Amino acid sequence: MLRKISTDKAPAAIGPYSQGIIVNGMLFASGQIPINPATGNVEGEDISAQAELVMKNVGALLAEAGTTYENVVKTTCFLADMGDFAAFNEVYAKYFTEKPARSCVAVKTLPKNVLCEVEVIAAL
């Protein structure tokens, strides 16, 4: 049985999807971008500031599902500019201390022209 995750501590979905789905003891979270959930506005002028907000949004989804960063088994990271890779990694490493499996790619454009997006799969 599928259970949808929804929290006002992370940005609302801006399309026809859920913030996350739990199935078989796993959370599949939609990608998070640097939107302040209280205002609905993109925040952060550089990759470090945007990555911090993305990680906080990911953390809110993890908490709502009853899990933590330590239980994340896979991340997919999207960067608007691979030149931001090192600065993004500095922020990422503070949160994902257990070093889950990861893919990181540069894409042409992200929603709302943000600099990064992160999606996670986590065990409950």
Image (cartoon, rainbow, N blue to C red):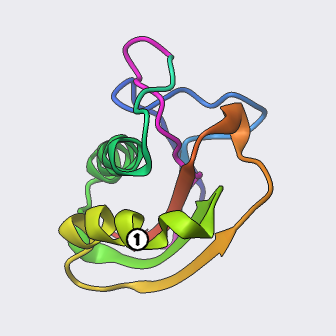
Instruction: Give coordinates of residue 65: x percent, y percent.
Output: 35, 51
Q: Residue at x 28, y 61 (%)?
A: 91
In the rendered structure, which amino acid carries the disc numbered 1? Ala
Q: Quadrant of residue 124?
A: bottom left
Q: Between 1 and 84, which is closer to the camera in this rendering?
A: 84
Q: Which residues are magenta?
A: 21-40
Q: Quadrant of the N terminus?
A: bottom right
Q: Is residue 7 magenta?
A: no
Q: To which residue does mark 1 refer?
A: 122
Q: Where does residue 60 sit, x and y in percent of width and height?
A: 31, 42
Q: Residue at x 59, y 51 (%)?
A: 30
The quarter holding residue 57 reads top left
Above or below, comparing residue 52 to residue 102 in the picture: above
How many marks the image carries: the answer is 1
The image shows residue 119 at horizontal and vertical percentages of 54, 60
Q: Nearer the viewer, residue 80 or 60?
A: 80
Helix, strand or loop: magenta stretch? loop
Residue farthest to the top, as pictured? 39
What is the x, y in percent for residue 85? 48, 71
